[in-house]
Image (cartoon, rainbow, N blue to C red):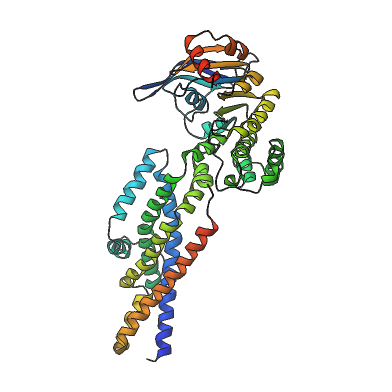
C-alpha cells in the first residue's frame, strides 16, 4: 500500500541511451497524486522520451520508475496490467483506424477490464458526451477533425479509469483553432484532480492548470518551478533563452 | 462416352478442386496468420522458428512438399482415415497448407509493417497484451491492407491444387486426363475446357477480393 505522502509516479536516477546518444541524463521526478506537471523544453530535449518511459513505451538503460509504489515490470502480462492504469494521449492521436469512435473507447474496458459490451458502451458514451463527441460515436476516426480525434483519444484513456494520465504533446499536431477544445478538456480533468504529466508548449495551459513546470534541455531536467515563477522569473540561462524564443513568437 | 458424361466428369473434377482449395485455404490462412504473428512477436525463439519454417518451406518446390506429405507421412505411419483416397486428400491439403501458409505469412507481414507504429503503441498503452494488440488492432488492419496481394497468393493456391492430381487426388486435371484417355479426338476442346474452368474459378475469386477490398477499406 502506498502511504499518503508517497509519490504516485517516481522517476529515480533514470538514464537512457540510444546507442551513443545520451537521451535522458540522471532524471529524478516525483509526482504526487492529483498533481499536474507540465514538461517543456526545446525539441530533442528528451521530454517526450521521459513521458514515454513512464509507461515503458520506451525502456530505460538504468534507474527506476515506480507507479503507485510498484516498479515497472518487464514486457508481459504484468506490464500490460500496469499500463491499463496509466492513460496515454499521443501527439498523433493514434485512434484505431478500423474501429468506430465508440469501439475505440470500449476496446480497453471490454478486453482488459472484462466489462460486458453493454456496460462498456454505456460508460463510453458518457465519456464521449463529456468530451463533446458523443454524436460522432458511429463514425470512423478519419471522418473527424484533429481536435475531435484527440478528444476521443482522451476519452479512450479515461475509459480505463487511470491513476495517472500522460499527455505527449497533445496539441502539437492540431490546427490552432482546435487547440483550445482539447485544452479545455484537459483543464477540466486537472480541476477534477486527475494526476497528469503533460508535455506541451502551451503556456496558457501550464499557467491555468499546472502545479509545477519541469524544464528540460539536452536530456536533463534543468529547472523545476511553479508556473508563474518559471515564466516570469526563470533562473537558468537555458530556460531564459528558451522562453525568450517562444514568448516572442 | 457422350458429352453429358464428359460434363459430369468435369463437374466432379471441379468439385474435387474446390474441396482441395477450400480446406487448404482455411489451413493456410490460419497457419499463415500464426506464422506472421510469430514473425513479429517479442520472443526471439518464436521469431526464429517462424522465419526458419518460412525459409525452408517457401524455397522447396511444391511438388517436393507433396512428395514429403504423400510418401513421407505414410512411411511414418501417419494416416488420417481408412480409405486411400481420403488419406491422399489430407496429404495433399496438408502440403498445400504448409506451402501456401509461407506466402500468406510473408504477405501479412508486409501488411503489418505498413500499419503506423502508433496503432500498436496506443493498444499497448490501453493495457492490451501483445496477443490482443495483434488480434484486435494490428492484424485486422494488416489483412485489409494486403487484400490485393493476398488475392494473388490465393489464386496461386487454386492453381497449385492441380499438382495434387499426380498424388492420387480427383480434381480438374485428373478429370481432364481421364476424359482425354477415353476421347482422345477431343483433346483440344478438353484442354481449353479445363483452362476455362480454372479461369472461371479464378475470376470469381477475383470478384470476391474486389468486393472485400471495397467493403473493408480503412480511411486514414
Quadrant into which the N terminus of chain A falls: top right
Q: Residue most toward the bottom?
A: B2
In the rendered view, does B187 fall on the left or right side of A35? Answer: left
Q: Looking at the image, which residue is at 54% across and 10% down?
A: A234
Q: Is residue B209 above or below residue A16?
A: below
Foreground residue among A235 and B143: A235
Residue B107 in view in this figure: yes
Q: Is residue B197 above or below residue B1?
A: above
Q: Looking at the image, which residue is at 58% across and 47% down?
A: A99
Q: Is residue B48 above or below residue B144?
A: above
Residue A17 sits in quarter: top left
Foreground residue among B118 and A143: A143
Quadrant into which the C terminus of chain A falls: top right
Q: Is residue A71 above or below residue B155?
A: above
Residue A34 in view in this figure: no
In the rendered view, does B109 fall on the left or right side of A226? Answer: left
Foreground residue among B98 and B212: B212
- Report x, y in % for residue A145: 60, 41
Q: Residue most toward the front?
A: A248
- Report x, y in % for residue B147: 46, 57
- Report x, y in % for residue B164: 34, 69
In the rendered view, does A238 fall on the left or right side of A8? Answer: left
In the rendered view, does A184 fall on the left or right side of B135? Answer: right
Q: Looking at the image, which residue is at 42% across and 54% down?
A: B31
Foreground residue among A168 and A15: A168
- Report x, y in % for residue A9: 57, 20
Q: How many numbered badges does the structure rendering display?
A: 0
Amino acid at each position: 500500500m502506498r502511504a499518503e505522502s508517497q509519490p504516485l509516479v517516481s522517476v529515480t536516477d533514470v538514464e537512457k541511451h540510444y546507442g551513443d546518444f545520451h537521451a535522458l541524463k540522471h532524471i529524478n521526478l516525483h509526482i504526487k497524486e492529483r498533481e499536474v506537471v507540465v514538461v517543456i523544453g526545446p525539441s530533442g530535449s528528451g521530454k517526450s522520451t521521459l513521458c514515454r518511459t513512464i509507461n515503458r513505451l520506451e525502456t530505460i538503460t538504468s534507474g527506476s520508475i515506480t507507479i503507485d509504489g510498484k516498479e515497472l515490470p518487464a514486457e508481459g502480462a504484468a506490464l500490460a496490467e500496469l499500463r491499463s492504469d496509466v492513460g496515454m494521449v499521443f501527439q498523433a492521436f493514434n485512434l484505431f483506424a478500423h474501429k468506430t469512435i465508440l469501439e475505440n473507447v470500449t476496446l480497453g474496458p471490454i478486453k482488459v477490464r472484462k466489462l460486458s459490451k453493454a456496460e462498456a458502451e454505456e460508460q463510453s458514451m458518457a465519456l464521449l458526451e463529456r468530451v463533446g463527441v458523443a454524436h460522432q460515436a458511429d463514425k470512423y476516426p478519419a471522418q473527424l477533425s484533429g481536435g475531435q480525434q484527440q478528444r476521443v483519444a482522451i476519452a479512450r484513456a479515461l475509459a480505463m479509469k487511470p491513476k495517472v494520465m500522460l499527455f505527449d504533446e497533445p496539441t502539437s499536431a492540431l490546427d490552432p483553432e482546435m487547440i483550445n477544445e482539447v485544452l479545455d478538456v484537459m483543464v477540466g480533468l486537472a480541476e477534477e484532480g486527475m494526476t497528469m504529466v503533460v508535455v506541451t508548449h502551451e503556456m496558457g495551459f501550464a499557467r491555468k492548470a499546472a502545479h509545477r513546470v519541469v524544464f528540460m534541455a539536452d536530456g536533463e531536467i534543468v529547472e523545476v518551478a511553479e508556473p508563474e515563477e518559471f515564466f516570469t522569473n526563470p533562473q537558468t540561462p537555458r530556460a531564459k533563452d528558451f522562453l525568450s524564443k517562444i514568448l516572442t513568437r | 462416352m457422350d458429352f453429358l458424361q464428359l460434363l459430369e466428369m468435369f463437374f466432379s473434377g471441379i468439385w474435387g478442386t474446390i474441396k482441395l482449395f477450400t480446406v487448404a485455404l482455411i489451413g493456410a490462412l490460419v497457419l499463415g496468420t500464426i506464422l506472421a504473428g510469430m514473425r513479429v512477436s517479442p520472443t526471439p525463439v518464436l521469431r526464429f522458428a517462424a522465419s526458419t519454417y518460412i525459409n525452408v518451406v517457401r524455397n522447396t518446390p511444391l511438388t517436393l512438399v507433396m512428395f514429403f506429405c504423400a510418401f513421407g507421412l505414410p512411411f511414418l505411419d501417419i494416416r488420417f482415415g481408412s480409405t486411400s483416397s481420403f488419406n491422399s486428400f489430407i496429404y495433399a491439403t496438408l502440403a498445400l497448407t504448409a506451402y501456401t501458409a509461407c506466402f500468406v505469412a510473408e504477405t501479412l507481414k508486409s501488411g503489418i509493417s505498413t500499419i503506423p507504429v502508433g496503432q500498436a503503441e496506443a493498444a499497448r498503452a490501453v493495457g492490451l497484451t501483445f496477443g490482443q494488440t495483434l488480434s484486435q488492432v494490428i492484424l485486422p488492419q494488416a489483412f485489409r491492407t494486403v487484400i490485393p496481394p493476398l488475392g494473388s497468393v490465393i489464386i496461386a493456391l487454386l492453381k497449385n491444387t492441380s499438382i495434387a492430381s499426380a498424388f492420387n487426388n480427383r480434381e480438374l486435371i485428373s478429370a481432364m486426363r481421364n476424359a482425354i484417355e477415353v476421347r482422345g479426338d477431343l483433346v483440344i476442346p478438353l484442354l481449353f475446357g479445363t483452362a476455362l474452368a480454372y479461369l472461371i474459378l479464378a475470376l470469381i475469386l477475383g470478384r470476391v477480393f474486389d468486393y472485400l477490398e471495397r467493403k473493408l477499406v480503412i480511411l486514414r
